[in-house]
Structures are given as C-alpha cells and as structure tokens.
Image (cartoon, rainbow, N blue to C red):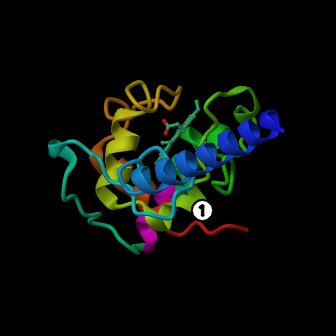
Amino acid sequence: MERRFNFLFVALISTLLGLSACGGTATQNSLFGEDDPVKKTGEPEEYADLANPYTGDPDAIAEGEILYQANCSSCHGYTGEGDGPASARLDPKPKNLAQNQPNLSDSYLFWRISEGGLMEPFNSIMPGWKGLLRDERIWQVITLLRTMIVQ
Ligand code: HEC
C-alpha cells in the first residue's frame, strides 16, 4: 500500500515538473524547438533586421533553385523536406526547410545560412556559406526557400 502511494506521488510530481518545464521554456527555447511554430529569432546583432531585397522576384527564385540544388539538396532534400541522400547519417538531422520557412525571419535565415551549424546550440554539420556564396546568392536561395511548401 505504501509502495503504491509512493508511486502515485512520484507520478504526480513528475507531471507537475513536466508541465512547468514546458510552460517555462516555450518561448525562450523557440530557437531549439524542432519545427517550432514560433518565429525563430536569436540572430546576433550583425544579422538583425535584415530584409530580403529579392522577395518574390522570379529571376532570384530561378537562380536560387540552381544554387539550392547544387549546394543544399544533398542534405535538405530536393524539395526541402530534410530528406536528402546525405541526411540519413547525420545527427542532428537537416531541418525540414519547406515546413519551417514560413516561421523563420529573413534575418534568421540569412544568419543560419551564412554561419552554419558549427556553434552553440546547433552543433551541426550545416556548412557556413558566407565565404562561399556572396550575399546576393544567399538572398537568392532564401527567395527560393520562400516558395517551398510541404508536399
Ligand atoms: C552537409 C549537410 C548540409 C548542407 C549541405 C546544408 N545544410 Fe542546412 N542544415 C543542416 C543541418 C544538419 C541542419 C540542422 C541543424 C542546425 O540548425 O544547424 C541545418 C539547418 C539549416 C537551417 C536552419 C533551419 C531551422 O529551421 O532552424 C537553414 C535555414 C539551412 N540549414 C539552410 C541551408 C541552405 C540554404 C543550404 C545550402 C546553401 C544548406 N542548409 C546546406 C545540414 C546541411
């Protein structure tokens, strides 16, 4: 009887702790959440308040498609769903860009694509593209990302 009481007590405490942990970190941890519906922020000052100069531009989308398929699709998949041929062996896995992009700001995208994942809290193999693609090119890729939708 006593044992059963202890079990219930532990279960109750765990539930309470679990609930408060979720409530307390929901906004603060939006950066880390997997496919979090909250718009992700957290970019450093130098990447704050950026806006894509090519939003909706068909030429930029076409350029972005070429750049994306050449540089990103091996990990993020041909349609951006995180299922490229190299993705299976990766930990953490490439993100589902098609699903996430509506919730990601231009600043966040430009920062993450420029700097990659070799930093806290990401610690991923996501390459940093700033020395490899000019700013204009990164914006073209972002313009393409904005057209991606979950299939
Ligand atoms: C070698 C594999 C690899 C390649 C190539 C790669 N990525 Fe990634 N990418 C990842 C991984 C793994 C993550 C998830 C971990 C992280 O956020 O760093 C990621 C995360 C991202 C994120 C963050 C998305 C989010 O929801 O927070 C963006 C944006 C992104 N990649 C865009 C790109 C673009 C654009 C390219 C091509 C220019 C590219 N990636 C090329 C592996 C890759």
**Residue 12 drawn at (x, y percent):** 64, 49
Relative to 106, residue 110 above or below: above
Q: Is residue 144 left or right of residue 73?
A: left
Which of the pair 33/71 is nearer the observer? 33
Magenta residues: mostly which secondary structure? helix
Q: What amino acid type is highlighted by mark number 1?
A: Gln
- Residue at the extreme left: 45
Relative to 44, residue 126 above or below: above
Instruction: Check disc 1: other Cα within 10 Å, few if <14, some if 14-19, many if 20+.
Output: some
Q: Secondary structure at mark 1?
A: helix
Q: Which residues are magenta?
A: 58-64
**Residue 13 drawn at (x, y percent):** 59, 44
For ligand 1, tell me if the residue under mark 1 lies within 8 Å.
no
Is residue 11 among what the camera can see? yes
Is residue 34 among what the camera can see? no
Q: Across the whole image, how many numbered discs are drawn on residues?
A: 1
Residue for badge 1? 99
Residue at image coords 78%, 35%: 2
Residue at image coords 56%, 55%: 35
Residue at image coords 75%, 38%: 7
Which of the pair 14/135 is nearer the observer? 14
Which of the pair 130/5 is nearer the observer? 5
- Residue 26 covered by magenta stretch: no
Relative to 119, residue 20 above or below: below
Residue at image coords 64%, 38%: 75
- Residue at the extreme right: 1
Q: Is residue 139 left or right of residue 22?
A: left
**Residue 8 drawn at (x, y percent):** 73, 45
Q: Quadrant of the C terminus?
A: bottom right
**Residue 1 drawn at (x, y percent):** 84, 39
